[in-house]
Image (cartoon, helix red, strand yellow):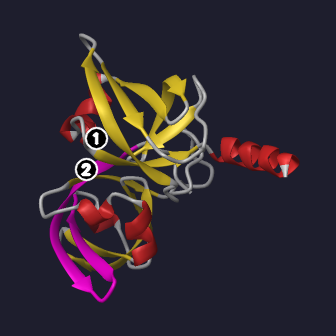
Amino acid sequence: MFTGIIETLGEVTAIERDHTNIHFTVQSVITNELKIDQSVAHNGCCLTVVAIEADQYVVTAIQETLDKTNLGAWTVGTKVNLERCMQLGARLDGHIVQGHVDTTAECVSIEDQDGSWKYTFRYLTGQPTVEKGSITVNGVSLTVVDSEEGLFSVCIIPYTHEHTNFHTLKPGSIVNLEFDIIGKYVARLMQQRKD
């Protein structure tokens, strides 16, 4: 479980294909605090640390993960949002995030609002968003500002813009989405009632 509060950025330094899997080597300032078999969210996608050497570590993505996330588009030099799993008893600053990406979305616009930025994203799944509800974009816990079917926007403060990979996004960029877990259960129950 995660909170959607990004700890630091990592950088992809090597990519190795192994049948349908991809091994990503990531350089990070938190590497010395990691251990083998630990879960770390990468752009909101929970991956297991399988090797550590100096300030770099390796995680493996299987085909299912590559199909549902933006990881397949990573290249050497890609900046990745990193968060270690939440600690029991600590404050939950963001919202409950599982690290299970539901789908990807395309950034369709970025509006400079003179001190903040408004990002609008389009996605294809039928999962709804709710104004003032929670959404996770590339692992970042955010509040939905505008919500339409298949479209939503979020506003980013300067700290988030600088300390996450939001500053690297542009129209056309693909991001990972994890919808609010409570909202997903409510939507599923409503669908079952219709069926």
Which residue sits at x=12%, y=58%?
77
Pinpoint residue 168: horizontal percent, then vertical percent: 19, 40
| Quarter assignment of residue 131 | top right
Pinpoint residue 89: horizontal percent, then vertical percent: 62, 49
Pinpoint residue 186: horizontal percent, then vertical percent: 76, 43
For the residues bearing labels 1 and 2, Cβ distance under 8 angstroms? yes
Which is nearer the eye, 146 or 97? 146
Which residue sits at x=75%, y=50%?
188
Look at mark 2 in the image and give the residue it sits on. Answer: 9
The residue segment tinted magenta is 6-28
Task: Say whether residue 186 is visible.
Answer: yes
Q: Is residue 42 magenta?
A: no
Amino acid type of the residue tagged 2 in the rendering:
Leu
Which residue sits at x=84%, y=52%?
195
Which is nearer the eye, 126 or 10? 126
| Quarter assignment of residue 110 | top left
**How crowded is the residue under tag 2: few (<14 C-alpha within 10 Å), some, or many (20+)?**
many
Q: Quadrant of the N terminus?
A: bottom right
Q: Is residue 123 left or right of residue 54?
A: right
- Give me the disc on residue 164: 1
Pinpoint residue 50: horizontal percent, then vertical percent: 35, 81
Amino acid type of the residue tagged 1 in the rendering:
Thr
Task: Say whether residue 51 is visible.
Answer: no
| Outermost residue to the bottom | 19
Q: Is residue 51 left or right of residue 68?
A: left
Which residue sits at x=50%, y=36%?
150
Q: Main secondary structure of the magenta part?
A: strand
Q: Of marks 1 and 2, which one's residue comes earlier in the chain?
A: 2
Q: Vertically, is 118 above or below 126?
A: above
| Outermost residue to the front | 195
